[in-house]
Image (cartoon, rainbow, N blue to C red):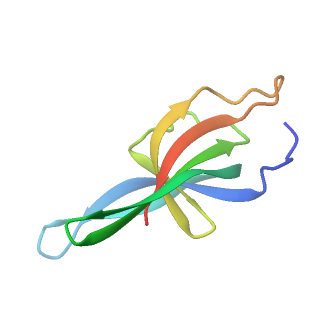
């Protein structure tokens, strides 16, 4: 599949955990793979709830190469922006030149 608009390097991260000195589990994220990707901001909105301004950005990330096992338990980081995965649609296909489509919500 030609690179085209897949001009961002996407880090696919998986949550990991380890015990601290007190025996408590401390969650962290580790990069398990990276892929060339296209990033499109699909929508954005701001809500004023309970004395707090909440901003959300929905985005569509198209991975140039397939990543088997990609799921909503993982996240994607592109150019310092972090995206929680909402849904993974289809698989990449070199013959039809379609990438793996991932619907995300940016962590703001």
Numbered marks: total:
0
Nearer-the-camera pick, 108 or 4: 108
Q: Is residue 67 above or below residue 23?
A: above
Quadrant of residue 98 in the image?
top right
Examine the rendered structure and indicate whether residue 100 appears above or below residue 45.
Answer: above
- Is residue 33 placed above or below 52 in the rendered structure? above
Quarter of the image with the N terminus in it? top right
Q: Quarter holding the C terminus?
A: bottom left
Instruction: Answer with left or right where residue 89 lies relative to residue 40.
Output: left
Provide residue 23's location: percent of width, then percent of height: 13, 68
* Front-lying residue, 16 or 102: 102
Which residue does the image show at 85% across and 47% down from the upper left? 3
Q: Is residue 70 visible?
A: yes
Judged from this view, the residue extending furthest toward the bottom is 21
Q: Is residue 89 left or right of residue 51?
A: right
Q: Position of residue 4 (x, y in %)?
A: 86, 47
Residue 81: percent from left, percent from top? 55, 66
Question: How far across and how far down the image is residue 99, in percent?
Answer: 71, 35
Please tell me which residue is depicted at 57% across the width and 70% down the height of the picture. 80
Residue positioned 35% across, 57% down in the render = 16
> Could you tell me which residue is drawn at 65 percent across and 35 percent down?
100
């Amino acid at each position: 599949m030609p690179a085209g608009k897949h001009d961002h390097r996407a880090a696919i991260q998986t949550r990991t955990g380890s015990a601290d000195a007190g025996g408590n589990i401390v969650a962290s994220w580790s990069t398990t793979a990276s892929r060339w990707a296209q990033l499109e901001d699909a929508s954005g909105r701001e809500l004023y709830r309970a004395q707090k301004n909440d901003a959300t950005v929905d985005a569509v990330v198209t991975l140039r190469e397939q990543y088997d096992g990609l799921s909503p338990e993982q996240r994607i980081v592109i150019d310092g922006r972090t995206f929680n995965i909402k849904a993974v649609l289809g698989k990449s296909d070199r013959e039809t030149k379609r990438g793996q489509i991932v619907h995300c919500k940016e962590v703001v």
